[in-house]
Amino acid sequence: MTASVLTRPRAAARVPARKPRRRLGPGRTVPFGAAVGPALLLTLWTVGSATGWLDARTLSAPWTVVATAGDLVADGRLQENLAVSARRAGLGLAIGVLVGTVLALVAGLSRWGEAVLDGPIQIKRAIPALALIPLLVLWLGIGEQMKVTTITLGVFVPVYIHTHNGLRSIDSRYVELGESLRLRPAVFVRRIVLPGALPGFLLGMRFAVVAAWLSLVVVEQINSTSGIGYMMDLAREYGQTDVIVVGLVLYGLLGLASDGAVRMVQRRALTWRRTLAD
Amino acid sequence: MATHAGGLTATRTVDVHGLVRRFCDRTVLDGLDLEVGAGEFVALLGRSGSGKSTLLRALAGLDRDVAGAGVVEVPENSSVVFQDARLLPWQRVLANVVLGLRGPDAVERGRAALAEVGLAGRERAWPSELSGGEQQRVALARSLVSEPDLLLADEPFGALDALTRIRMHGLLRELCVRHRPAVLLVTHDVDEAVTLADRVVVLDAGRLAVEVTIDLPPPRSHRQPQFLAYRESLLRALGVDQTEG
């Protein structure tokens, strides 16, 4: 007892200060982390325009773009074109998500379904939307039908790929559980397949919403008379870089907002998951 | 798989005759016979790789693509407890318990089953929020909520720590007294088998080599000399030489 009291201070003094363990996860979240990159870009753009390093004919200054946007809103052109674009993108997205999900379910739940569907979809994935447009114009004309179809074709592929992948990576032990509980097929799909594929589906949705806006650019700059893309194409003919930039910023914001919306749904719907990012 | 009715088989819940199971050219079960009476608790011992799980999966009807022959008669209403709790991570605890349950009173029965395993109040928890022992208790509730005639358990406590395992033994015994299902418990733990079972069978070379009826009053413990005798004879049947340890 006395011996231990005598030796304790010396022993304690000899213990070296331990280095904190190296963190292997990505660490604490940065406040407003998502805004850091865009803010940096905006700063560069502002500084470039103010110092004359960026010629106004190459890229209009941020304040010109803001003023132009104000004018476009004032005379109603922006809202009008945005409404048309949003309707196209929304319609194409809705149909594409439905088609992609149904195809993924068919291919994921039946070997024959996969044999028939997976190959053609992988081929479609390798063909750029732009390359399909001549054919679609011949088939469907240059009206709304062609535009919505092009967007649908761009949307359903990522939804299919990720949902199918999510479905196929459901642990076979859960399938066995379903068999041991004698679940009816409908219950099996609703309680095990769909929730199990949900993380994949939502990842597919993130790609899909962005794909919808991207396909929009393609269809609206070809043979179009309305929409943001048309507005930008018209501005190109008159050399109005400010209007083009307004369109670009709009596309960016729309993509960002829709991606953010999907991510919010993701957080809500996948509360049961604990991942590296948490 | 057929449900038996009436006559001589009325008190027999499981009837396996001449069961053969083959993986490639390896015969795992070779003409195995097994009967389990209604409400009887049978523990199945065997070295690792002896085919314990193969037998259990055959009884559970989970071995569709395996080559073999033989007659397997088990009740339609049987349920399985796996070694992992196998809870759906995307469903809350109560939803996991009533998975596969039909009828308007499903939720009520689910709540009652959870209360029985001592988890009342955790209905809304996610499985990932529970400890390993709690998860396995939810799995027990799920398999008993349908009031099965036969409970098939594949090393259900194998992944738990020793203390939790002892508690689970007590719980399982309690639940079996109350619900009276026939039980086939696959385990590699001789103590677990002697503690819980009415009868212990040892699987060796594809057949049941040894069969021991455990005639010990509860609560069973190591302090009973007969317990040690049963233990020793079973260990010998498993080829473990006690003098080595």
Image (cartoon, coloured by chain):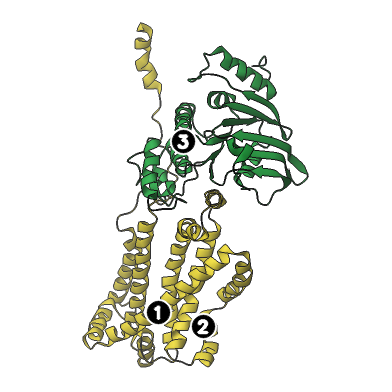
Decide which of tag 1 and tag 2 comes sooner along the chain: 1
Type of amino acid under label 2? Leu
The label nearer to you, 1 versus 3, is 3
Query: Real-space Cα distance between discs 1 and 2?
Result: 19 Å
Query: Real-space Cα distance between discs 1 and 3?
Result: 56 Å
Say if mark 1 contacts mark 2, CB within 8 Å.
no
Q: Sort mark 2 into few (<14), some (14-19) or many (20+) by Cα contacts within 10 Å.
A: few
Tag of residue A130: 2
As drawn, is A132 to the left or to the right of B142? right
The answer to whether dots 1 and 2 both sit on one chain is yes
* Quarter of image, res B19: top right
Where's residue A174, x and y in %? 53, 51
Q: Foreground residue, A139 or B11? A: B11
User: Which chain shows up in green?
Assistant: B
Where's residue A226, x and y in %? 36, 89
Q: Sort mark 1 into few (<14), some (14-19) or many (20+) by Cα contacts within 10 Å.
A: some
The answer to whether dots 1 and 3 both sit on one chain is no
Q: Which residue is mark 3?
A: B179
Tag of residue A55: none
Asked if one can make out residue A140 in the rendered structure from this viewpoint, the answer is yes
User: Which chain shows up in yellow?
Assistant: A
The label nearer to you, 1 versus 2, is 1
The label nearer to you, 2 versus 3, is 3
* Quarter of image, res B28: top right
Q: Foreground residue, B197 or B72? A: B72
Q: Check the residue under mark 3 and report the chain it is in.
A: B
Type of amino acid under label 1? Leu
Type of amino acid under label 3? His
Where's residue B56, x and y in %? 62, 40
* Quarter of image, res A207: bottom left
Asked if one can make out residue B155 in the rendered structure from this viewpoint, the answer is no
Q: Which residue is mark 1?
A: A91
